Image: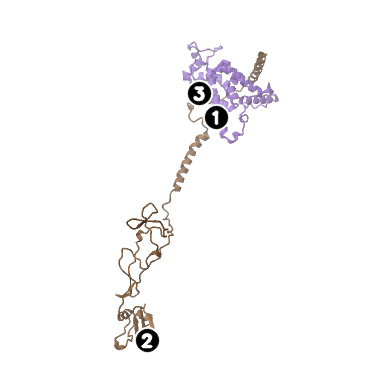
Amino acid sequence: MAFDSVRSTDVGAKLKRMPDGKLSDHELVDATRGGDESAFSEIMQRYRNPLTNYLYRFLNDYEEAVDLAQETFVRVYFALDRYHTQYAFSTYVYRIATNLAISELRRRKRRKLLSLTGLFQSEEDSDVEFQPMDGRRMADDELVEDERSRMIGRAIAALPEKYRIPVILRDVEGKSYDEVAEIMELGLGTTKSRISRGRALLKEKLQNYL
Amino acid sequence: MDNENKSFEVLENEEVGRLLGGLKRVGAPKDFDFQVRARIAVGRPAAGGLSWMPASIRYAAPLAVLLAVGGYVGMMQMDQVDETVGPVIVAAPTEPALPPVVGMVDTDSTEPIVTSDLTADRVSAEVKPVQTVDRSTTAVQRKSSPARPKVEKPEGGSYDTAGTGQKTIVAPDIDDLAPIPTPKKVFISAKEFLSSAGIDAGSTATGGRIQSVGVSAASAGIRVGDVIESVDVQAGTIRIKRDGKSLTVKIN
């Protein structure tokens, strides 16, 4: 198998091998550079769901989140030659996704300025909610949970982007403070401060759910 | 106390973090990998350019420029004078024409004026001298200029003190012109006068009885057989006798 041949390669001290024996991200990147398409498929397998979830919480729009997640992988693929192993591959991927999301936010603002109807439309009304994949009828509890999730999503979407990004990375995606700081290219203190401030703003809006 | 407040605040914030952490997670669709591969097959994503610009502006701006240029060119063409149209008729100047002056001729002409209705070799009792007015030097101003103070030059003559010192030629008023002298008249003989009128009075033996009448005499009323009593060449009249009555007939 292609993975066996890749696993036996000496990839250097900086590369991390996964505890369960799976190839590390850097090994997969190297394999992709070498022309191994299955390595890139493995990369997508690992990061497509977290990235989609992250972008969905950021934009509060599922379709847009899927589109930007796909775009992220496309850019990663074409920029593999420029990727350096000095920092984690997840940081690299999330940084690309964050930049794409910020660009989309700004594009939305411009579209709203140009659109006459958009001037009278709040940001909360313009989001596209996540639709469940299956066609099952939702129970009352699920409906309540769904409404709760929708409200939290709107509250997050209402945060300024400089607070929204670290809060989602930390609290939704479970990244460490160091990882969040690395993705946002900020100092650790600034990152913690922004997370704290973002949570405080959310607390004001989500009093009923706390 | 302050530390307790701070940890209370941190705890509250952590509660928010836990709330967010408990949100339902969404996943990528089943065709996610396929879509990514399709995009990779298309090629590199566009870097920069005008992708940041909304499509409406990207396409509307060049169109607006085209419309503006086209409209400007069209307006410029419409403002041009249409040379195919016929000449514009301009109303003649309303400057009143000078009253005709009898006997006025061009300054270049020295021929005497002859006024007469008679078509003869030597006709007309009136020969008027040439009365000329040098129109070429007349200015636009027709009205008599107001009196200006004149300064007498030591050597004689005078000049106007008004103006810048340049000479202004002002046309004399018609009323100021010298009266036209009475033209001199040249007398011809009565026989010549009658002959010019087409009247044949024969010889003295006939006693002045008219033998034939020309057209002009006949139109004046003279008949054959009338007896000429007298001829006033100056007045252009002939006194005749017909049927014992005397008549004075003017020959035109």
- A161 relative position to B171: left or right: right
Marks 3,1: beta carbons within 8 A: no
Q: Residue at 59% across / 26% down in the picture?
A: A59
Q: How crowded is mark 2: few (under 14 residues within 10 Å), some or many (20 or more)?
A: some
- Picture layout, residue A111 above or below residue A29: below
**Chain under label 1?**
A
Q: Residue at 35% across / 70% down in the picture?
A: B181
Q: Residue at 47% across / 40% down in the picture?
A: B66
Q: Where is residue A174 in the image (x, y as percent from the top left)?
A: 60, 17
Read off the residue under disc 1: A107
Q: What residue type is labelled 2?
A: Lys
Q: Identify which residue, B41 or B212, lies in the foreground.
A: B212
Q: Distance between the residues labelled 3 and 2?
A: 140 Å
Q: Identify which residue, B100 or B175, lies in the foreground.
A: B175
Q: Which amino acid does label 1 sit on?
A: Arg
Residues beneath discs 1 and 2 located on the same chain: no
Residue A75, numbered label: 3
Read off the residue under disc 2: B241
